[in-house]
Amino acid sequence: MTVLALAIGPAELVAAQVAEDVDDEDIRRVPVTDRTSWETCRDLLYEVAQGANVASVGIGSVGPVDMAAGVVAPSGIAQWRAGFGIVDAARKAFPGAEVNLAVDGVCVAQAERAFGATRGVMDAVSLSVSGHIAGGVMMGGFVAVGRTGNAGHIGHLLVPGFDERCACGGHGCLEAVASGSAMLGWARAHGWGGTTLTELIAAADLGEEAAAAAAGRAGVALGRAIASVAALLDIDLVVLGGAVAECGPALWKPLGEAVAEHARLSYLPGLRVVPSPLGELGVLAGAGVLAMAGSSAGSQ
């Protein structure tokens, strides 16, 4: 039986069959545009299913989500902003398949626990920082889901020293400073001439002034937010993945300095921030964990 994973991000949809030997050639990607709809997701899943009988589908989506209702409401997909019943739609597209949904940060935490940097760890926070920021919290060996399914939304933690307007309508959110899209916007507003996050990361590593400054600001904001979350949750491990984590010292040095400056309580000196071994595939891998759970449930 075939098991499918779908990751819905702010910039692209990513899907694959779940298998031990998945590589880049097996992963399909479609950019998110003004015309993105359920049909876009469905056709992408049909493509990766290759006509096979599908036992389960795991879906990880940028939030907000309503897990109980099976609804997603990402701001980046115009047709879904008021809420879309993606679980029911997936069940109709794949009759008889088990369908599981989680917000992207929960998926990241599930993936890190299953086969990433938090295997065997009881308490940790996992972040994926790309176009936006996804966060997941693991306490006592269990990934926190929350009342509606949106636990771990660290991207909307307020960061002292910053007052940028966030897409959520607030000011000073971590995502408004440290997400890939925020870094790009800031760097271009300060004279950098590139267009993509990949270019920005390379330019920052080469020391280009505006690009390096954008990475540095992001590092400071991430470090402050991480120190705050560690103090709140009494954790000593944070895993950082996603495209932004591919930055070199331009991001990681100020991040580490900010953590050291603000994580000063007696139970925090051992706080570690480590890169994720999953890179940019944390959400898709976590959707795969959801799908495998659904497949196991369906076979019992």
Image: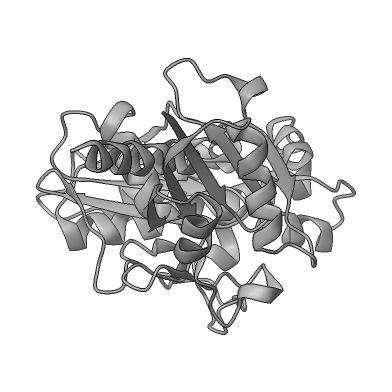
Q: What sort of colour scheme is used for the picture?
A: one colour
The residue under the point 39% across, 44% down is 108
Which residue: 61% across, 32% down?
51
Residue 135 in picture, x, y percent from top left:
39, 54
Q: Nearer the viewer, residue 224 or 281?
A: 281
Residue 105: image location, x then y, percent = 40, 53
The quadrant holding residue 285 is top left
Side (left or right) of 18 relative to 266: right
> In this image, 129 relative to 1: left or right?
right
Residue in the image at 19% along x and 63% along y:
232
How many numbered badges does the structure rendering display? 0
Q: Nearer the viewer, residue 219 or 126?
A: 126
- Residue 299, position in %: x, y? 24, 36
Residue in the image at 51% along x and 59% along y? 92
Q: Is residue 272 visible?
A: no
Q: Residue furthest top?
A: 21
Q: Is residue 146 above or below residue 203?
A: below
Q: Position of residue 56 (x, y in %)?
A: 40, 42
In which quadrant will I find the N terminus?
top left
Relative side of 24 to 184, left or right:
left
| Vertical relation: 59 (above or below) 155 | above
Position of the C terminus by quadrant: top left
Q: Quadrant of residue 79?
A: bottom right
Q: Is residue 80 visible in the rendered structure shown here?
A: yes
